[in-house]
Image (cartoon, rainbow, N blue to C red):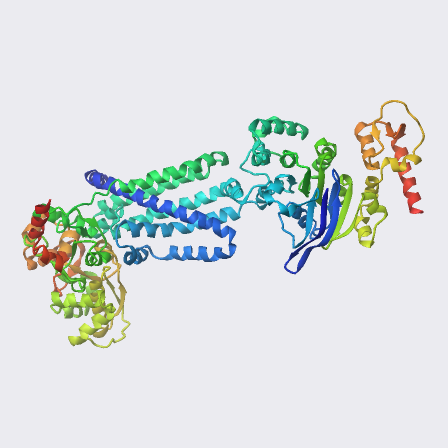
């Protein structure tokens, strides 16, 4: 668990981060969201001490991070940068091996771990000897991710990790990111200015403005229970798409047709309506079997969309 | 053309021992100073990337050092470090500093900020970030700086011969003094080839890919040290008395060559610039030096002239030499210049030189005071009726004479004067006259005979004893060959001479050059 207490960072008279506090539970994915200059990146970099705070404290699993040297702290925290920050003079394999070498792993262990990781990240073994500039942007970002994950740190910090990628590559990597089992065991704090990305990847979202937290909560909470006008207007433009992402199939379960089905399930009702709709498209089927608790239903695309709009209307009338 | 190349080749083959030694010295000087410059410049460059507020000052100082003319910088070094290798290396390394510091700074600050941040975020400490990331990524830029510094050093190292540090400058400046093109080329061509060669080799290194660069940057220091060690192989100066001669004196028949052939004197001299030689003798860095008999520093530094008992130094009576076409264009010129003829004796010239060289009066003041005392000074007429161009070689006596002629022309004629003083040695000055860049300059009969006409040895033998014969021969030949006229001699004889400190000469009972030879042989 990460606990941030009354954290502030002033650059001269500018209060980049102004007394913020929040907690991130183990294995939770927290997104720091906001426009540029809101203090989200400064907050992230204070967690691995790339920036030293003006005041306040940060605790990981109850331990004050200022009690250890920054080098030791950082070796236990994965870090992914927007422009990947790969060493241009190191091969892919050498880039991934940086942290294990700092931790003095033996070479066999490093090699084994690298091979294991690159398979999970859909990189080929041939690319290990290549230099970063010989790879595509998406591949470079995967190597950056591998480098952050290689020593299996419990915490992963990501600074706009997918910001430099084109839309097609980005949505592909989003999907892989969500499916990656390595990440399921990690506490992740990710910075982004992309609202869609925040809703897609975050368990909770921390919306920041002018160095302060405006609202922190699940995507649905931000969307349906905004604390003020700023939150509402921040999400307004892309509201429909965000709602598809914020609402889970289990939320609209009672509105779906009761066509019970016996047999294996294609989907689980924990996923968002948006993900469900994407599954119809990718699997090219009329009906999918969706499972919620002990019940499996066969649902069509139109039926899913209709149920979502019914749910939306009922909320609007509340 | 063919014949010319052959003679150059012959010269180089004849002098191959010297050429090899000078080349090795040159390489050694270049790389010793380069290594020290890297050892100082690289950490300094790194340091100012960490303390950015100092970067302006450090780069500024290094930049100013770069703009100091090389000869001036060498001059500054002498009071601090004497003559020889030490000041030469220090001067060279000061020149090499700027490109190394600047490129280290630019290289490191140019490393992608995201890469540096990633390195820190991975848990590297500051030394690991420096050595594993910043320096390696900055290496191509740093190497480019070292490359620039090397080429600069190969060039500036030619000037090291001015302060007795050897190198290919001995041939180059000796050749300029002696009007010997082969000698100049024998020094200049290898120096240019060295610059091209090192530039090429370092450029190969610079464009190696990043992977190979890691091994290359490890072998480079070893290579540099090997090249630097060249300097220490040839330095077999020995002997009871230390001799230092100017490059000009070294190569002349009426200089060191004559001392060797006529006296059998072998003193193993080091080569040194006239500008520092007297001081070096005074400070006991040297015991025997070559010099001019009218030099003011004789008096200043208590030096005495050794008697030339076998008469190898021909007379060097000074006289203005003027282009014939200039005499036609300026009808009043000849009689004005001749106002000075016969007016200055050896002792007067010594005294005038003493005033400029030692009392640091300006040549203009010394010239003016002298003309006033002889009632020759008239206020300038401020005529603007065409311009007479006066040249001079690069030493005090010539400056004084040029000033006197300037004042006389301005006072007695309606011509205006432009002076081009400090035209290096005989070759540069004479070429300027011959190519109509100047109209006149003061020259010496002996120099005309030996350096410019390069008269055959038979002719020289028949003339050397007699001043008038020499003057007449030179005047005739100049008129025939170049259309240049020797006006009447000024009076003094500024001949070559060997000199020692008065005290030491008395102690050792050395009065003549033959005495010197006897003393050296008795001890060997």
Farthest residue, direction top: A263
Q: Is residue B377 above or below residue B53?
A: below
Q: On the rendered structure, is A265 left or right of A104?
A: right
> In what quadrant of the picture does the N terminus of chain A appear?
top right
Tell me residue B231's x, y (percent): 28, 42
Camera-side residue of A42 and B512: A42
Tell me residue B283's x, y (percent): 21, 58
Within the image, what quadrant is residue B80 found in? bottom left
Camera-side residue of A181 and B362: A181
Tell me residue A296's x, y (percent): 89, 27
Q: Is residue A118 above or below residue A315?
A: above
Figure label count = 0
Within the image, what quadrant is residue B361 found in? bottom left
Would you say residue B110 is visible in this rendering? Answer: yes
Camera-side residue of B56 and B355: B56
Q: Which residue is found at the position 30% from the left and 52% from the top?
A: B87
Tell me residue B463's x, y (percent): 6, 54
Q: Is residue A293 above or below residue A31?
A: above
């Amino acid at each position: 668990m990460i606990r941030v207490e009354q954290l502030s960072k002033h650059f001269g008279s500018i209060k980049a981060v102004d007394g913020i506090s929040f907690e991130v539970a183990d294995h939770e994915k927290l997104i720091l969201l906001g426009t540029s200059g809101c203090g989200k990146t400064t907050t992230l970099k204070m967690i691995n001490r790339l920036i030293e705070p003006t005041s306040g404290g940060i605790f990981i699993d109850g331990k004050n991070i200022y009690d250890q040297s920054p080098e030791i702290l950082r070796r236990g925290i994965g870090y992914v940068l927007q422009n990947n920050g790969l060493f241009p003079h190191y091969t892919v394999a050498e880039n991934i091996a940086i942290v294990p070498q700092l931790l003095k792993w033996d070479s066999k262990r490093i090699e084994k771990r690298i091979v294991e990781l690159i398979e999970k990240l859909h990189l080929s073994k041939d690319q290990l000897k290549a230099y970063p500039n010989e790879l595509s942007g998406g591949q470079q970002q995967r190597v950056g991710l591998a480098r952050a994950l290689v020593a299996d740190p419990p915490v992963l910090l990501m600074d706009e990790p997918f910001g430099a990628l084109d839309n097609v590559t980005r949505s592909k990597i989003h999907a892989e990111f969500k499916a990656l089992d390595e990440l399921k065991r990690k506490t992740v704090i990710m910075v982004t200015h992309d609202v869609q990305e925040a809703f897609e990847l975050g368990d909770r979202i921390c919306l920041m403005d002018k160095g302060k937290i405006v609202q922190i909560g699940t995507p649905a909470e931000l969307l349906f229970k905004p604390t003020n006008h700023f939150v509402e207007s921040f999400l307004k433009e892309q509201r429909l798409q965000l709602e598809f992402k914020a609402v889970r199939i289990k939320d609209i379960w009672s509105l779906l047709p009761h066509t019970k089905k016996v047999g294996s399930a294609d989907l689980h009702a924990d996923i968002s309506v948006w993900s469900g709709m994407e599954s119809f498209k990718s699997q090219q089927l009329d009906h999918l079997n969706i499972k919620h608790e002990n019940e499996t239903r066969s649902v069509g695309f139109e039926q899913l969309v209709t149920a979502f709009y019914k749910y939306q209307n009922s909320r609007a009338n509340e | 053309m063919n014949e010319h190349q052959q003679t150059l080749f012959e010269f180089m083959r004849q002098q191959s021992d010297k050429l090899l030694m000078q080349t090795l010295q040159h390489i050694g000087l270049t790389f010793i100073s380069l290594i020290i410059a890297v050892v100082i410049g690289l950490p300094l460059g790194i340091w100012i990337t960490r303390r950015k507020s100092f970067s302006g000052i450090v780069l500024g100082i290094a930049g100013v050092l770069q703009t100091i003319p090389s000869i001036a910088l060498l001059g500054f070094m002498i009071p601090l470090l004497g003559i020889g290798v030490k000041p030469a290396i220090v001067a060279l390394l000061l020149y090499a500093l700027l490109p190394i510091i600047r490129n280290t700074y630019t290289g490191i600050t140019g490393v992608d900020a995201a890469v540096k941040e990633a390195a820190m975020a991975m848990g590297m400490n500051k030394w690991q970030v420096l050595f594993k990331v910043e320096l390696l990524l900055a290496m191509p830029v740093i190497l480019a700086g070292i490359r620039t510094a090397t080429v600069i050093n190969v060039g500036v190292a030619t000037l090291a011969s001015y302060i007795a540090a050897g190198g290919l400058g001995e041939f180059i400046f000796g050749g300029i003094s002696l009007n010997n093109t082969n000698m100049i080329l024998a020094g200049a061509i290898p120096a240019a080839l060295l610059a091209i060669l090192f530039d090429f080799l370092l450029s190969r290194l610079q464009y190696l890919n990043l992977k190979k660069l890691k091994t290359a940057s490890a072998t480079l220091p070893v290579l540099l040290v090997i090249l630097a060690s060249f300097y220490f192989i040839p330095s077999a100066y020995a002997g009871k008395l230390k001799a230092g001669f100017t490059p000009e004196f070294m190569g002349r028949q009426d200089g060191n060559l004559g001392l060797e052939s006529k006296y059998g004197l072998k003193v193993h001299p080091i080569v040194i610039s006239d500008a520092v030689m007297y001081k070096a003798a005074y400070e006991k860095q040297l015991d025997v030096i070559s010099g001019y008999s009218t030099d003011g520093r004789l008096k200043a530094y208590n030096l005495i002239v050794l008697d030339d008992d076998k008469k190898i130094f021909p007379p060097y009576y000074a006289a203005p030499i003027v282009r014939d076409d200039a005499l036609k264009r300026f009808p009043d010129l000849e009689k004005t210049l001749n106002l000075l003829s016969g007016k200055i004796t050896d002792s007067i010239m010594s005294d005038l030189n003493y005033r400029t060289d030692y009392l640091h009066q300006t040549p203009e003041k010394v010239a003016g005071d002298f003309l006033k005392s002889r009632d020759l000074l008239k206020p300038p007429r401020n005529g603007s009726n065409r311009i007479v161009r006066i040249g001079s070689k690069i030493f005090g006596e010539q400056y004084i004479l040029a000033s006197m002629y300037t004042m006389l022309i301005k006072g007695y004629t309606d011509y205006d004067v432009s002076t081009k003083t400090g035209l290096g040695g005989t070759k540069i000055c004479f070429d300027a006259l011959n190519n109509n860049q100047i109209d006149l300059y003061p020259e010496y009969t002996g120099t005309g005979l030996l350096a410019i006409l390069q008269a055959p040895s038979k002719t020289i033998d028949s003339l050397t004893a007699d001043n008038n014969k020499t003057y007449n021969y030179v005047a005739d030949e100049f008129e025939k060959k170049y259309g240049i006229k020797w006006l009447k001699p000024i009076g003094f004889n500024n001949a070559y001479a060997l000199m020692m400190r008065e005290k030491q000469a008395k102690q050792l009972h050395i009065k003549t050059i033959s005495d010197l030879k006897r003393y050296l042989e008795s001890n060997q």
